[in-house]
């Protein structure tokens, strides 16, 4: 009988909604205009305030002949020097590992 006419919870919801709510002002825990550089770098590339990739191109200098070769940071193949056939980097699961003695610098767009 009664359960069909008055479903559970409906009366309670109306009573709770009628309550007045107090407006409270609280300070933010973080500064959204000036995010910490280290924290932004640690975030996922899509969750940063401004999306940016983790990968980059770099100029790698061969330790033997000092020739400069452009290499992708996440290269998936072994990169050899075009002049003396020395291995410049070898692939890993993520970032490519540079050979000892190779110096590099990020390419600027």
Image: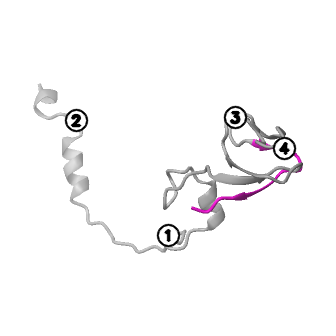
Looking at marks 4 and 2 on the same chain, the residue that comes earlier in the sequence is marked by 2
Residue 15 screen position, x and y as percent: 22, 53
Magenta residues, as a range? 97-109
Quadrant location of the C terminus in the rendered image: bottom right
Residue 44 screen position, x and y as percent: 56, 49
Which residue bears the numbered disc 2?
8
Residue shown at 68% from the left, 58% from the top = 106
- Please give left or right for residue 77 compared with residue 102 in the image: left
Which residue bears the numbered disc 1?
32
Pointers 4 and 2 in contact (CB under 8 A)?
Answer: no
Q: Secondary structure at mark 3?
A: loop
Pointers 1 and 2 in contact (CB under 8 A)?
Answer: no
Looking at marks 2 and 3 on the same chain, the residue that comes earlier in the sequence is marked by 2
Q: Nearer the viewer, mark 4 or mark 2?
A: 4
Closer to the camera in the image, 98 or 71: 71
Quadrant location of the N terminus in the rendered image: top left
Residue shown at 73% from the left, 35% from the top = 92
Looking at marks 1 and 3 on the same chain, the residue that comes earlier in the sequence is marked by 1
- Please give left or right for residue 26 compared with residue 78 in the image: left
Q: Which disc is residue 93 wearing?
A: 3
Looking at marks 1 and 2 on the same chain, the residue that comes earlier in the sequence is marked by 2
Whole-angstrom CA distance, mark 2 to mark 3, is: 56 Å
Give the vertical position of 62 relative to 90 (above or below).
below
Give the vertical position of 50 relative to 7 (above or below).
below
Q: Secondary structure at mark 2?
A: loop
């Amino acid at each position: 009988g009664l359960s069909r006419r008055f479903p559970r919870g409906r009366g309670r919801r109306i009573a709770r909604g009628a309550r007045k709510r107090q407006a409270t002002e609280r300070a933010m825990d973080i500064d959204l205009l000036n995010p910490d550089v280290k924290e932004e770098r640690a975030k996922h590339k899509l969750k940063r305030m401004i999306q940016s990739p983790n990968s980059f191109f770099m100029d790698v200098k061969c330790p033997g002949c000092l020739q400069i070769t452009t290499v992708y940071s996440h290269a998936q193949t072994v990169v050899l020097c075009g002049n003396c056939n020395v291995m410049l980097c070898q692939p890993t699961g993520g970032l490519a590992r540079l050979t000892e003695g190779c110096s590099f610098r990020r390419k600027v767009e």
